[in-house]
Image (spheres, coloured by chain):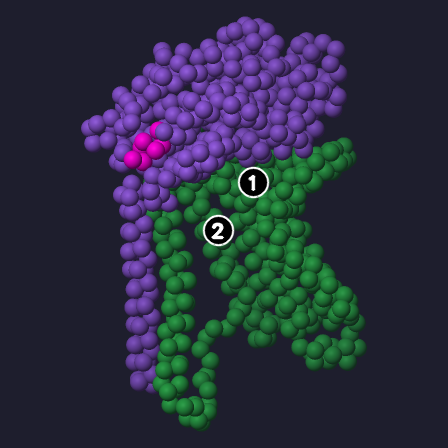
């Protein structure tokens, strides 16, 4: 009896020793990973041949198209993970990526605190989509007040007189309005609610943010979730990035813009908004692009931003990344327009380049121009 | 994490004589080596569980300190509005799970009995394979199916039918203030969960029902019992603890299911659903939807706090299941 218990103890000790050894090995392996071979600390990036980015999902189609084009030209790979704007900001703040992407710009003070700089990389539009029998694409006319009232539950049937007043001759059903919004925190929501805050006046009191305490409606996950929900629910209204509305063949609406004109969503009307943007006058490119003036301007537009660390650990990596963005600004406009994004105009790119040379340093010397 | 009752207590060793007959080398090294390997594996499971709990508590410490237990009684999850509450998600989790179990458990039992006792083996094999294939389908597929098929069906057919009849006046069916047509709702998510857990409960129940000794059943028939009496008084009693185990596996899956629910439950984080047709949220789907964009320390910490609560709930259910199984074993006479 005694002998067997002693043996048992020996076995337990051996098991524990094996376990501890395994844990120690695992920890050691983690430690090795933490310091990638080039010393940049960015996983999966052995050389300057791969640029790693993460963030907003809205520009993802464009960045991945640019990435594969650039790869075939220069052999440099772009690995952009569309994890959401907030995730992109966290990742670049923690220096686990070369750049972060966000649909909502950071305020100058926030950039300062995190040691980051940002610039706009492209401009896109958010549209309202509806699922109503007999209503064709861009037939329904909505104002910011109407949209705000729908999203607060104040206007809750399609036969509401306020809706009929703007849509003479359009037969709207006598059914409930099913409001669809985002359930996840999102840059699209940030752009959309900033528009309501700017254009709907007192009707919209919930402010502009990535996440809103919606008083009504159901939440969809991602742009694709909202698009699918609107497709499935009769009598519903939702907001999505233009590309998703186009892809899924959803019925979008007209909006009344800041000049009081009715406009339809298109690359041209988004471009009008982008043309109004005063990037030179914006501190750290912090600019909210909604409700811009002009007779043919689409009112719900937003820029998607790139964020990078001001102090770059590795000159070669930093330059490889900037070369990619340089190429995207110079040569990528056609690809952008093909995917319904408005490219950044050349004069704004010159401004961005001058900010690069001012702000991006490696060991005290600027990393741009090459 | 299975609660299926596998007896792992050390059994009496092989007869002494048999051991002596074996070659000396095997006797000296085979057993101890296997014991060490088995112990390492067993210990690593326990260590993984405790470290998981530890990491959850460590990472949610900020939220626990700041929000305390009022996190459990605060309704709305709205970080931008300054409200961190788990009650809406807890209520949604409970409601979807109850809907799923109320539908899935009886149905699974009937199917299991049908497969083991009533249909010829060849037919049972075909149906059984179908059920096992259902169990292998990834949950996102169920989510898609729910989104494209069940949501419009609930919105256009079921909800109007219920609302227009006297059923729409009953407490859990009367539309609440957040009602959005019933397509994305607690009920839709619960129905899909029921379909998802059904194959698990059915397959496990069938396996334990198959283990009921033939002799015992024959004895029942021999005493002049009807099929129903044999099913109820012999098969079900004998297999009871296994069936409860199967039910708890299904329950665990329903509690923690994330993506399918996130697509269907409506993503409404602010209020406790008043009706099965109201949109809501569950703990797991809320975490999945909010984690990506949670930026402040408190946001992340509060989400992990919610994960800790889910962890605690599943643990409580596991412990309750164990206690119940021990009790059941005593009353059903040892075996089972």
Check the image and report above or below for B243 versus A343.
below
Main SS category, magenta section: helix
Q: Chain of mark 1?
A: B
* Residue shown at the point (32%, 52%) measured from the top left: A30
Q: Is residue A166 above or below residue B142?
A: above
Q: Residue lying farthest left?
A: A364
User: Label 1, on which residue?
Assistant: B262
Residue B313 is labelled as 2
Chain B: drawing colour: green
Place of residue B308 in the rendered image (x, y in percent of width and height, measured from the top left): 43, 47
Q: Percent x, y for residue A127?
A: 58, 21
In the image, are marks 1 and 2 on the same chain? yes
Q: Is residue A323 magenta?
A: no
Secondary structure under tag 2 reads helix
Is there any visible trace of residue A53 in the rendered image?
A: yes
Q: Which residues are magenta?
A: A316-322
State the mark number for residue A256.
none
The answer to whether residue A299 shows anywhere in this view is: no
Left or right placement of residue A333 versus residue B52 in this view: right
The Cα–Cα distance between marks 1 and 2, rounded to whole angstroms, is: 20 Å
Q: Residue at x 37, y 79 (%)?
A: B32
Outermost front residue:
A73
| Residue B212 x %, y % | 66, 74
Name the residue at 79% across, 72% down. B226
């Amino acid at each position: 009896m005694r002998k067997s218990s002693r043996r048992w103890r020996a076995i337990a000790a051996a098991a524990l020793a094996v376990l501890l050894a395994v844990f120690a090995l695992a920890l050691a392996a983690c430690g090795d990973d933490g310091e990638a071979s080039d010393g940049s600390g960015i996983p999966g990036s052995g050389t300057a041949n791969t640029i790693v980015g993460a963030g907003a999902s809205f520009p993802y189609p464009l960045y991945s198209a640019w990435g594969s084009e650039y790869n075939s030209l220069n052999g440099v790979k772009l690995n952009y993970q569309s994890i959401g704007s907030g995730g992109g900001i966290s990742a670049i703040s923690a220096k686990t990526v070369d750049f972060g992407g966000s649909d909502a710009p950071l305020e100058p003070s926030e950039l300062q605190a995190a040691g980051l700089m940002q610039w706009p990389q492209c401009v896109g539009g958010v549209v309202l989509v509806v699922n109503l029998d007999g209503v064709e694409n861009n037939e329904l006319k909505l104002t910011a007040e109407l949209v705000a009232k729908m999203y607060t539950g104040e206007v809750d049937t399609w036969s509401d007189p306020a809706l009929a007043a703007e849509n003479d001759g359009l037969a709207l059903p006598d059914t409930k309005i099913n409001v669809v919004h985002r359930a996840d925190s999102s840059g699209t929501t940030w752009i959309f609610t900033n528009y309501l805050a700017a254009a709907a006046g007192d009707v919209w009191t919930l402010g502009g943010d990535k996440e809103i305490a919606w008083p009504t409606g159901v939440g969809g996950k991602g742009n694709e979730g909202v698009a699918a929900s609107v497709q499935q629910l009769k009598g519903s209204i939702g907001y999505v990035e233009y590309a998703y509305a186009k892809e899924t063949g959803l019925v979008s609406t007209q909006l009344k813009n800041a000049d009081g004109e009715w406009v339809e969503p298109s690359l041209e009307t988004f471009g009008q908004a982008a043309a109004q943007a005063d990037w030179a006058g914006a501190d750290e490119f912090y600019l909210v692009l909604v409700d811009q003036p002009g007779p043919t301007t689409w009112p719900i537009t937003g820029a998607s931003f790139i964020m990078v660390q001001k102090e770059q650990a590795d000159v070669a990596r930093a330059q490889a990344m900037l070369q990619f963005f340089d190429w995207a600004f110079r040569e990528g406009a056609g690809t952008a327009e093909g995917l319904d994004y408005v490219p950044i105009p050349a004069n704004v790119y010159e401004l961005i380049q001058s900010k690069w040379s001012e702000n991006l340093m490696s060991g005290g010397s600027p990393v741009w121009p090459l | 994490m299975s609660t299926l009752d596998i007896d792992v207590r050390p059994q009496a060793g092989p007869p002494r004589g048999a051991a002596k007959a074996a070659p000396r080398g095997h006797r000296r090294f085979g057993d101890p080596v296997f014991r060490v390997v088995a112990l390492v594996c067993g210990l690593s499971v326990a260590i993984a569980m405790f470290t998981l709990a530890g990491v959850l508590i460590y990472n949610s410490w900020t939220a626990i300190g700041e929000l305390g237990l009022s996190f459990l009684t605060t309704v709305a999850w709205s970080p931008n509005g300054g409200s961190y509450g788990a009650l809406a998600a807890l209520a949604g989790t409970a409601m979807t799970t109850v809907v799923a179990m109320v539908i899935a458990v009886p149905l699974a039992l009937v199917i299991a009995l049908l497969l083991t006792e009533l249909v010829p083996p060849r037919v049972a094999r075909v149906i059984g394979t179908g059920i096992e294939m259902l169990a292998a389908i990834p949950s996102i597929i169920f989510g898609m199916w729910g989104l494209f098929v069940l949501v419009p069906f609930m919105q256009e057919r079921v909800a109007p039918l219920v609302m227009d009849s006297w059923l729409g006046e009953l407490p859990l069916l009367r539309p609440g203030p957040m009602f959005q047509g019933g397509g994305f709702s607690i009920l839709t998510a619960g129905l899909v969960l029921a379909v998802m857990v059904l194959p698990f409960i059915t397959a496990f129940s069938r396996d334990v029902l198959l283990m009921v000794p033939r002799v015992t059943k024959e004895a029942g028939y021999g005493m002049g019992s009807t099929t129903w009496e044999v099913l109820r008084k012999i098969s079900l009693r004998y297999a009871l603890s296994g069936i409860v185990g199967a039910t708890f596996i299904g329950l665990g899956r329903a509690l923690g299911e994330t993506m399918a629910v996130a697509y269907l439950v409506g993503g409404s984080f602010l209020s406790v659903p008043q009706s099965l047709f109201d949109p809501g949220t569950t703990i797991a789907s809320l975490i999945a939807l909010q984690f990506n964009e949670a930026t402040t320390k408190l946001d992340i910490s509060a989400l992990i706090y919610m994960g800790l609560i889910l962890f605690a709930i599943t643990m409580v259910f596991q412990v309750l299941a164990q206690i119940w199984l021990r009790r059941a074993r005593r009353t059903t006479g040892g075996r089972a």
